[in-house]
Amino acid sequence: MHSLVLFLHFVGTAALLGGWLATFRNPTVLQWQHIGAWIQLVTGVALVGLLEMGDGQVNHIKIAVKLVVLIAVLVAAIIGRRKIAKDQPVSTGLAHAVGGLTLVNVALAVFW
């Protein structure tokens, strides 16, 4: 079960980063980035739950920091998608926040 949830977590990361890199010159927030942020949230919570149920040690401070960063990514993705739905331009800063903060979260996962 853990491997499947981890795989899906990586898929969410790929959707967020891939969408950011694909639109880097003309920044926007793609539907798959929005979906990827939700995938990250659901699978991240599931991964922590699986670790808590097993014998794994959970660094709660690290998880809290990563959750705050992910919430910022999710909020930016939601705002970006709402702007697109209203035919409004997505600001460069908002679009890059989705990808840039995702990259920060990956760095936190790897180096902390």
Image: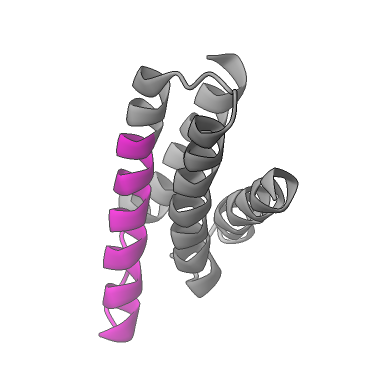
Residue 82, visible in the rendered structure: yes
Colour scheme of this structure image? Answer: one colour
**Residue at x 61% of width, y 59% of height:** 15
Residue 24, visible in the rendered structure: no
- Residue 109 placement: quadrant: top right
Q: Give 68 or 51, whichever is nearer the viewer.
A: 51
Q: What percent of the width, then of the height, locates residue 39?
A: 51, 59
- Magenta segment's dominant SS is helix
Q: How many marks?
A: 0
**Residue at x 40% of width, y 32% of height:** 66
Q: What percent of the width, then of the height, locates residue 20?
A: 55, 54
**Above or below: residue 54 compared with residue 91:** above
**Residue at x 49% of width, y 73% of height:** 31
Q: What percent of the width, then of the height, locates residue 24?
A: 55, 54
Q: Is residue 16 a member of the stretch shown in magenta?
A: no
Task: Give the extent of the magenta segment.
Answer: 67-91
